[in-house]
Each structure stands twice: as structure tokens, then as C-alpha cells.
Amino acid sequence: MTDPRVVVFDYGSGNLHSATRALRAAGAEVVLTADADAALAADGLVVPGVGAFAACMDGLNAVGGPAIIAQRLAADRPVLGICVGHQVLFGHGVEHDLDAAGVGVLPGVVERLHSARLPHMGWNTVEAPANSVLFAGLGGERFYFVHSYGVRSSADLAPDALVTWTEHGGDRFIAAVERGPLSSTQFHPEKSGSAGAALLRNWIATLG
């Protein structure tokens, strides 16, 4: 049996090489590319991202990323967003007084966290739903976060969305979302040690 083929979407943003290494270690055949045909044909597509929401969206738009993501999801083909790659899946982001449209496959707004200590940089436990696939076999582990913005409400998400929560400085925000073929994490699984590796193996196991 061959390893699942995963494309790490290279649109000019993200921890591309650390994500690639972590996915390979977790059992995937990984290609780093912005090629649309490869991204559509892969068993799984990973959308990384670091930096500003609007800049990531500019990079995604330049390579047709929103249409590729939407087409994959419409065909029930898995997509995993990481950090700002998680954030841009939502409707829009408000950063430095700039309101930028996101990919919009998840309703909601990315906004500055209400904490006195930003950026949020470090290790957090999360509260995952019992039927989570990403967090199967995990409980109490810590994951690595580095960000100042997040989604603080799940009110607009569909009832079948599985939402994982965490908090920083008393402010609760979404740590991960799972809905059908779409998964996303605010934290960096590729930088989260054995817990992150287990989560990536769980996701890769869905690609067969």
C-alpha cells in the first residue's frame, strides 16, 4: 500500500519545510507546489500560513487558492489549514484596521485576541469534542501556538462542525475545526512534538 499523497500548498507563505518534514515523518508522500492540478489531484491538501491575514490571502488569490480549496471540498477531498492557513478559511479577518475577505468556507471573523499578553506564543492544552478525529487518542497534550489573532465565536458555524477550544489570558478562541473533509488548526502541529505528530497521523489516516 502506497503512502497517501499530500500537497503542501506553496503560495509564498508558511512554514513550508517544517510542515513538509513533519508530514513525511507522519507517513505521507509530500509534494511542495502551487500547481493547481497537483493540488486538486492529491489525496490531501495542506494550506499553511504565517504573518498577516491579508498578505496570505493575496498570495492565495495569486495562485487561485480559494477556488482550489472550494473545489476540493465540494468533491469531499480533504484539506488541512494550519495557523494563518486556518484563519484564512473563515469569512474575513480584521487586522490593523484592515478588513480582508477570506476564503469563506467557514463563516466567522478572525480578530485580535482580548488578552493583555500578545502575541500568544507557547504551549496550550485544548478542549476537543469526544468524537474528534484529529484528536483521537489524545487528551491533555499541549500544542504550540504563535499568533495574536483568532476566531472567538463558533456561533455561525454549522451544527455538524466539531470545534476544539483553548484560551489565552482568559480569552477563549477556536483551536481547531473539523467539518467533513475540512480540518484546520490554529496551532502548529508540525512544531508540537509527539502530540502534533499524532494529530498529523490521525489526519493522514483519513486520506485513504
Image: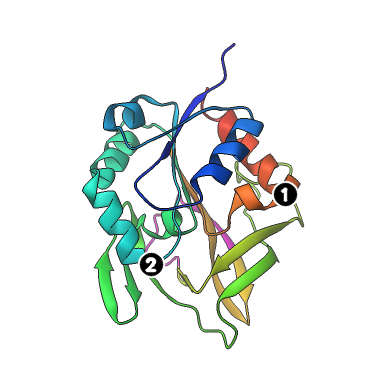
Q: Secondary structure at mark 2?
A: loop
Which residue carries the number 2 mark? 52
Question: Which corner quadrant of the image does residue 198 belong to?
Answer: top right
Magenta highlight: main SS: loop
Residue 6: x percent and y percent? 47, 30
| Quarter of the image with the N terminus in it | top right
On screen, residue 203 above or below 99: above
Q: Nearer the viewer, residue 102 or 105?
A: 102
Which residue carries the number 1 mark? 193
What kind of residue is marked 1? Gly
Label 2 packing within 10 angstroms: few (<14), some (14-19), many (20+): some
Any part of residue 180 in sight: no
Please indicate whether residue 140 sits to the left or right of residue 43 in the image: right
**Label ID, residue 30:** none
In this view, which residue lies farthest toward the top?
1
Residue 184: x percent and y percent? 49, 50
